[in-house]
Image (tube, grey):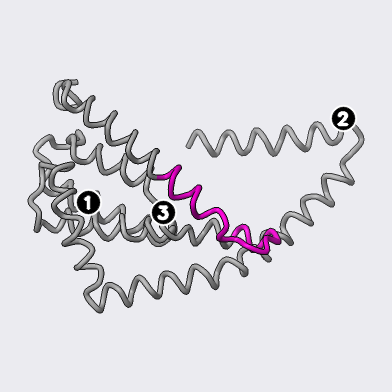
Amino acid sequence: MLLSYIWVLMIVGSVICSFITGRSAILAAAITEGADKSISLLFSMAGVMCLWTGIMKIADKSGISAGIAGILSPVLSKLMPDYAKDSSALKAVSANITANMLGLGNAATPLGIKAMKEMQKHNRLGDKPNNSMIMFVVINTASVQIIPASTAALRKAAGSTDPYSILPLVWISSALALLAGIIVTAALNRNGGVQNG
């Protein structure tokens, strides 16, 4: 809700400043140009997003997602001890992590919501998130991206001749962010976390 107010404030402020400085024609041209570019960007990204979302569907139907879930489950069960290895909650978490690893923010979002709903079903703290739920939010936010599809699509739309040249830096930065997030969250959870706070 607060974000909506911020956007309105920015838009109204821009219009007022354009009138004060006598640049309303420039603002009008920028609005038109921006709208035009946003449609072009949308179409250029749609192909990449459809491709990887389709691959995720194939991976799900073929059992690859289940295999990835099996690989991730020993680690996830340590990080999220409130849920059993074979629980529906950790399977949903694995699907979300897989989508994030492919850089599919749009596909990962509904999977993340589903995972949180599954975790909430077995949450003994009621409306208060348990430590495993907090760990999931951190892992989801600071996810390792093996194939940053969305970012590559944005770079391609902006004219990059090699949109995947950022891969090594994405791997390093996302891995370090994830590691830092897990360490800090685990330390806070060990020192009381939400259950005693």
Q: Is residue 130 above or below residue 160?
A: above
- What SS does tag 2 mark? helix
Q: Earlier in the sequence, mark 1 or mark 3?
A: 1
| Residue 132 placement: quadrant | top left
Q: Label 1: which residue?
A: 117
Q: Position of residue 2 (x, y in %)?
A: 50, 33
**Contact (CB < 8 A) between labels 1 and 3?**
no
| Residue 127 placement: quadrant | top left
Q: Position of residue 143 (x, y in %)?
A: 37, 47
CA–CA distance in space, label 1 to label 3: 24 Å
> Left or right: 71 with respect to 110?
left
- What SS does tag 3 mark? loop
Q: Image point 79% across, 33% down: which residue?
A: 16
Q: Amino acid at mark 2?
A: Ile
Question: Which label sits in the foreground, 2 or 1?
Answer: 1
CA–CA distance in space, label 2 to label 1: 50 Å
Q: Label 3: which residue?
A: 145
Q: Image point 74% across, 54% down: which residue?
A: 34
The magenta span reads: 154-174
Question: Which label sits in the foreground, 2 or 3?
Answer: 3
> Left or right: 156 with respect to 33?
left
Q: Label 2: which residue?
A: 20
Q: Position of residue 133 (x, y in %)?
A: 22, 41
Is residue 61 found inside the magenta-colored segment of the image? no
Q: Amino acid at mark 3?
A: Gln
